[in-house]
Image (tube, rainbow, N blue to C red):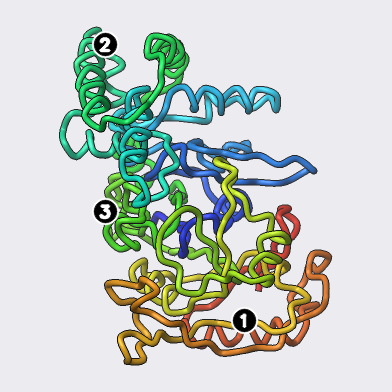
Amino acid sequence: MAVDLLLGLQWGDEGKGKIVDVLTSNYDIVARFQGGPNAGHTLEFDGIKHVLRTIPSGIFHEKSMNVIGNGVVIDPVVFVQELEGLDKFDIDYKSKLILSRKAHVILPTHRLLDAASEASKGKAKIGSTLKGIGPTYMDKTGRNGIRLGDLELNTWKDKYRALANKHEELIAFHNVDIQYNLPEMEAEFFKAVETLKELTFIDSEEYLQQAQKNGKSILAEGAQGSLLDIDFGTYPFVTSSNTTAAGACTGLGVAPNQIGEVFGIFKAYTTRVGSGPFPTELFDEVGAEMAKVGHEFGAVTGRARRCGWLDLVALKYTCQVNGVTQLMMMKGDVLSGFDKLKVCTAYKYKGEEITHLPYNIEPENVTPIYSEFDCWKEDLTKMREPSQFPKELNTYIDFLEKELEIPIKVVSVGPDRTQTIHR
């Protein structure tokens, strides 16, 4: 059985959690392959909103096994809080949730180091969520990190102490005023580790390979968005992992020739959290209205999202990098009632018109070139069939499909499971 992928195609916050939740009934296994608790996948059903940080979005489905792959970084404290949030829904996560021994652990000092590093940058901040993600991946690539499998060893606390001491030296090197009580943070951390160790640790690459041989269907769930990829995103304003399709191979141990469908998720407009270039960003009342109607605030951080028109140049780029086979458009309902819609179809780049994403998309280099569309006035949130779509929405979708040369199979018209229309 091939492994299908679900990825965000913009700067994150596209609505991946909802679509994984919708798709999960078709899969035996849902697996997270990168990122950490800076992700916030929001699912809404039965009148309740759930926000998941590290746990795969399939946890709410009875038959699905949920795997956290080797490419993920795990904060035991945040993870246990997430488990406690599931307790009130009587979810048997101990039998439905398994973790790769090769996944790296976020230490308390990783979070402190993240804060110190970001504070030292001043106005050049990259917009870190301060969850310790970047420093943990730095230790991973620097071959200093602690992995879940280490927690099964009697000597793991010795390794912890050596790494935490090194981190404190680095925090001091940044020479910024970071107030913290490490013994207090460590007490909470060590307690959470003991809870974490009650779950099942696995050799996830072997588990998934055997699952494939046994005909199990697998959905790989990405976090953040493709434009935040450490290699192919808007560097340095990116996350610390590979958020694109290739990251699923390295983050789960799945061979490239085993990848099946690649579901690409995008909003009908564009948003971005934190710093970094954003060619189609709106600074007027239209952008403010998008943010208000779309409730554009981070599910984990609460940070306001910057809003702008759909950027087809960037979207084409991420479709190509990921090999997207099906598209799913989110939040079409948010645009209802605008006077006109715009879509960026090209950039004016250093005096030349281009349709590819260049190395640098800072405002001094890039000016968006727009196509304009009539907007639909109808409330989409009550619609349940494509036949109910207004002609202006169909025109918008048809244009995007033609430009991207990929079918848009799903249109979301609200946050609930039921507000998901298949075309």
In the picture shown, does residue 52 fall above or below 340?
above
Which numbered tag is attached to residue 397? Answer: 1
In the picture shown, does residue 264 fall above or below 404?
above
Quadrant in the picture for residue 336: bottom right
Q: Crowdedness of circle 1 by 10 Å Cα count: few (<14), some, many (20+)?
A: some
In the foreground, 306 or 269: 306
In the foreground, 195 or 58: 195
CB contact under 8 Å: marks 2 and 1: no
Q: Is residue 421 left or right of residue 114?
A: right
Q: Residue furthest bottom?
A: 352
Disc 3 element:
loop
CB contact under 8 Å: marks 3 and 2: no
Distance of mark 1 from mark 3, alpha carbons? Answer: 33 Å
- First-in-chain label (3 vs 2): 2
Which numbered tag is attached to residue 157? Answer: 2
Q: Amino acid at mark 1?
A: Ile
Distance of mark 2 from mark 1, alpha carbons? Answer: 55 Å
Distance of mark 3 from mark 2, alpha carbons? Answer: 34 Å
Disc 2 element:
helix
Disc 2 versus disc 1: nearer the observer: 2
Tell me if I can see residue 210 in this picture. Answer: no
- First-in-chain label (1 vs 3): 3
Q: Crowdedness of circle 2 by 10 Å Cα count: few (<14), some, many (20+)?
A: some
Quadrant in the picture for residue 112: top left
Q: Residue at x 40, y 54 (%)?
A: 3
Tell me if I can see residue 275 in this picture. Answer: yes
Q: Residue at x 30, y 72 (%)?
A: 360
Q: Residue at x 30, y 77 (%)?
A: 358
Disc 1 versus disc 3: nearer the observer: 1
- Which residue was labeled with disc 3? 255
In the foreground, 333 or 46: 333
Q: Quadrant of the C terminus?
A: bottom right
